Amino acid sequence: MKRTINRIIPAQRVNMGGIMLDQPLPMHGVEQIDPFLLVHHWDDTLPGGQHERELGVGPHPHRGFSPVTLIFKGAVHHRDSLGTKSIIEAGGAQWMNSGKGIIHSERPPKHMAENGGEFEFIQFWANTPASRKMEPAKYQPLTAEKTPTVVSEDGKVKAGIVAGKAMGKEGPIELMTPMLVMRFDIEKGGKMEVDLPKNFNAFFYQLDGKLNFDGTTTKKKDLTWFKNDGESIAFEGLEDTRAILLAGEPINEPLATYGPFVMNNQTEIMQALRDYQMGKMGVLIEEFDS
């Protein structure tokens, strides 16, 4: 049985530290779609003639969840307090289990700062169960070449499996909780049906284009949230469309958040703040070539 739509949530423009983003989650009345807490879509064109240190998001901490970046245009330079330096280009992903604490930065790489170009990515936050929130942090890079892909029978839909299992393939990301993360390039007229465990919460987010879900049309920057009333999601491209599917087993635990920390109660949030201030999440001193 195919799932039906619960709600369509259009993204809203938000200002995050001077960076304008499209945010479909959280939204008024929808704090989370468990285990997913946040979705940000950043689409911009860099003018060039800039320094890397002037762009993106500088060093900041995280604890208790996984911030994940899916790159669609350009590239993202990740640095963190584990000593990681990693540049992932379009088609790839940067998956970070923040665990008990990590400090990282996310910026366009040097060549993009200098030469300019299109820069587009989606970042989402996936919650971690209480039993695993204080595990060591881990960064997992994934290039486009190492992302398992499947193609629809009509040849008009290409799907990348970033994490979880679908259509006989499995994404390489080590997960903290069961989920499925896919990215789609859909041509007009392309059709695909994706099987899901019935208990997984699930939604699509469209970067552009138009889709048809069993007679309902969704558009650019819509989040389409499905009911848990079936074991598959089927769609058809009404225009060329790029989209992602986020689906996961709900954690069903109390949620306490403060900025970059996601825990289960306010006492744990206060401890996270103290640990960060005391340097227990490590130190990141960025080094730039120019």
Image (cartoon, grey):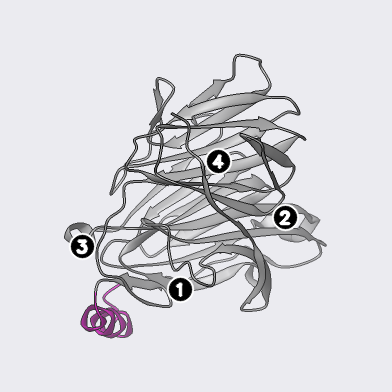
Q: Which residue is mark 3?
A: 130
Q: Which contiguous range is marked in magenta?
A: 265-282
In the rendered structure, find residue 60 and report the number of the disc placed on it. Answer: 1
Q: Which residue is mark 4?
A: 92
Q: Does the CB distance between marks 2 and 1 fall below 8 Å?
A: no
| Secondary element at tag 2 | helix
Cα gap from disc 2 to disc 4, whole angstroms: 17 Å
Which amino acid, mark 4? Answer: Gly
- Residue 173, quarter of picture: top left
Left or right, 108 with respect to 83, comes to right
Left or right, 237 with respect to 115, comes to left
| Secondary element at tag 1 | strand
Work out whether mark 3 precedes mark 2 in sequence or the reverse, and give the earlier one. Answer: 2
Which amino acid, mark 2? Answer: Met
- Please check the rendered image and state whether residue 55 is part of the magenta-colored stretch, yes or no: no
Cα gap from disc 3 to disc 2, whole angstroms: 39 Å
Nearer the observer, disc 3 or disc 4? 3
| Secondary element at tag 3 | helix
Which amino acid, mark 1? Answer: His
Work out whether mark 2 precedes mark 4 in sequence or the reverse, and give the earlier one. Answer: 4
Work out whether mark 3 precedes mark 4 in sequence or the reverse, and give the earlier one. Answer: 4
Label 1 Cα crowd, 10 Å radius (few <14 / some 14-19 / many 20+): some
Q: Which residue is mark 2?
A: 112
Q: Which residue is located at x 66 percent, y 15 percent?
A: 154
- Answer yes or no: is residue 120 visible: yes
